[in-house]
Image (cartoon, rainbow, N blue to C red):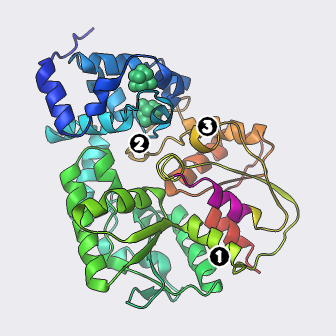
């Protein structure tokens, strides 16, 4: 067994505190975080113990777990001392990426973000290809909002259908919107979560400059990850815009009776709360309201919903890393959806859809379609 790397205690704590992870000091070792962490369901890990070792400068977070954490904040929601564990981990990652100690696939992600401004390695000139044939216009002042598409909806063939579905809904509801097209860059979430805040800053500043140049005041995002950085991080860099997730907009459109939806039989639908929409932004009711506005839909709740939702396994850079069968949280979620009697599993985050759909194909005992809320609504447009 390798001996733990011992770092001077004061130096480590000073560094973490300066980098924003000072809440680590508050931990009194109750163990709630260990009990809540989804990794505890698939591995023998103790978040509590790792935090204690880190407090002591004994390298608790410098092992594998540093890159396993999905930054889901389930532990943060339960911690009685207000320790921002996800931020402690993110901050510790800054030290690791500074010396190139991140896993290989994340080095590739950082390289792609720096060169082509998206983590998937797509060509910048093909960023708006998803919108071909839809008549989506470039954003211009006077439009109702800018649709911030995000990299996964722009480049991933499965998630492009979500962006196309949302366009159909907004058009049907008479919303005047535009996109940045090939000028949109990654929102920066992957860079921030894997511990490269300088790269995050350069991407955020690029988008912020584009918002100013085009006169953007109001933004709607497809990804809850984009929502979180645009709302919480961009203002610190002088790029303040009014921002919301598309499910919030659709809930308002439903209230205003601007979504004309048809019935297609009686269907039991369950909804998976994405961590970055729920725990990070408190958006729990709006996606449910949208689904319930579809005639014939009956919402069935799974175990672990809202603030207690089980992470899909895709946040914090994990979507770019392989997770072996037997350790995929999304497999557990499929079993929970089946126990709830769902005929369709809906969610509202590109990473959740990718992970849940993969799991549905491999572990569901009978076919369980996985749909983004936007897709499910678009399928029912009258
Ligand atoms: S829940 Fe909070 S106080 Fe309890 S062990 Fe975890 S970090 Fe420490
Ligand atoms: S943020 Fe999520 S994955 Fe990370 S330690 Fe907390 S509960 Fe575990």
Provide the major secondary structure of the magenta segment. Answer: helix
Mark 3 secondary-structure assignment: helix
Residue 47 visible in the picture: no
Residue 331 has which mark?
3
Q: CA distance from mark 1 to mark 2?
A: 34 Å
**Residue sitting at x 54%, y 35%:** 328
What is the x, y in percent for residue 39?
A: 49, 28
Mark 1 secondary-structure assignment: helix
Q: Can you say which quadrant of the picture contains the N terminus?
A: top left
> Mark 2 or mark 3, which has the lower sequence index?
2
Disc 3 crowd, CA 10 A, few/some/many (<14, 14-19, 20+): many
Compared to residue 155, the image places residue 213 above or below, namely: below
Q: Quadrant of residue 336?
A: top right
- Left or right of residue 25, residue 300 in this image: right
Residue 340 has which mark?
none
User: In this figure, which residue is indicated by the disc labeled 1?
Assistant: 253
Judging depth in this view, the residue of 344 and 234 nearest the camera is: 234
Does residue 283 belong to the magenta stretch?
yes
What is the x, y in percent for residue 81?
A: 41, 27
User: In this figure, which residue is indicated by the disc labeled 2?
Assistant: 318
Compared to residue 180, the image places residue 244 above or below, namely: above
Q: Quadrant of residue 218?
A: bottom left
Compared to residue 147, the image places residue 8 above or below, namely: above
Question: Which portion, as a residue range, is magenta?
Answer: 282-291
Ligand 2, by image quadrant, is top left
Q: Residue furthest right?
A: 265
Q: Nearest to the eye among marks 1 and 2: give it.
A: 1
**Residue sitting at x 33%, y 39%:** 87
Q: Can you say which quadrant of the picture contains the C terminus?
A: bottom right
Q: Are marks 2 and 3 in contact (CB under 8 Å)?
A: no
Q: Are marks 3 and 1 in contact (CB under 8 Å)?
A: no
């Amino acid at each position: 067994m390798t001996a733990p790397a011992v770092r001077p205690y004061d130096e480590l704590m000073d560094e973490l505190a300066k980098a924003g992870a000072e809440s680590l000091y508050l931990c009194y070792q109750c163990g709630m975080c260990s009990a809540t962490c989804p990794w505890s369901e698939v591995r023998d890990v103790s978040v509590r113990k790792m935090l204690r070792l880190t407090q002591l400068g004994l390298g608790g977070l410098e092992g594998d777990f540093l890159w396993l954490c999905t930054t889901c904040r389930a532990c943060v929601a339960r911690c009685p001392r207000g320790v921002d564990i996800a931020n402690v981990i993110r901050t510790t990652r800054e030290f690791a990426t500074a010396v190139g100690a991140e896993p290989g696939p994340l080095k590739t992600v950082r390289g792609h973000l720096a060169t082509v401004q998206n983590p998937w390695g797509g060509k910048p000139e093909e960023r708006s290809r998803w919108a071909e044939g839809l008549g989506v216009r470039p954003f211009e002042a006077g439009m109702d909002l800018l649709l911030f598409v995000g990299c996964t909806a722009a480049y991933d063939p499965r998630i492009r259908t979500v962006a196309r579905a949302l366009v159909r809904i907004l058009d049907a509801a008479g919303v005047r919107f535009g996109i940045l097209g090939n000028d949109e860059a990654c929102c920066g979430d992957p860079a921030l979560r894997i511990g490269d805040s300088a790269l995050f800053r350069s991407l955020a500043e690029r988008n912020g400059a584009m918002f100013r140049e085009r006169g953007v005041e109001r933004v709607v995002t497809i990804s809850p990850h984009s929502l979180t950085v645009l709302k919480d991080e961009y203002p610190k860099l002088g790029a303040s815009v009014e921002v919301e997730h598309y499910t919030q907009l659709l809930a308002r459109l439903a209230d205003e009776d601007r979504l004309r939806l048809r019935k297609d039989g009686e269907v039991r639908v369950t909804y998976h709360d994405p961590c970055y929409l729920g725990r990070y932004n408190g958006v729990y009711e709006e996606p449910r309201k949208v689904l319930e506005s579809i005639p014939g839909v009956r919402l069935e709740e799974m175990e672990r919903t809202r603030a207690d939702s089980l992470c899909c396994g895709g946040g914090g850079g994990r979507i770019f890393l392989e997770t072996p069968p037997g350790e995929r949280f999304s497999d557990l979620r499929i079993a929970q959806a089946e126990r709830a009697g769902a005929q369709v599993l809906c969610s509202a985050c590109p990473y959740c859809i990718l992970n849940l759909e993969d799991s549905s194909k491999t572990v569901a005992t009978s076919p369980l379609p996985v749909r983004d809320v936007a897709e499910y609504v678009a399928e029912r447009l009258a």
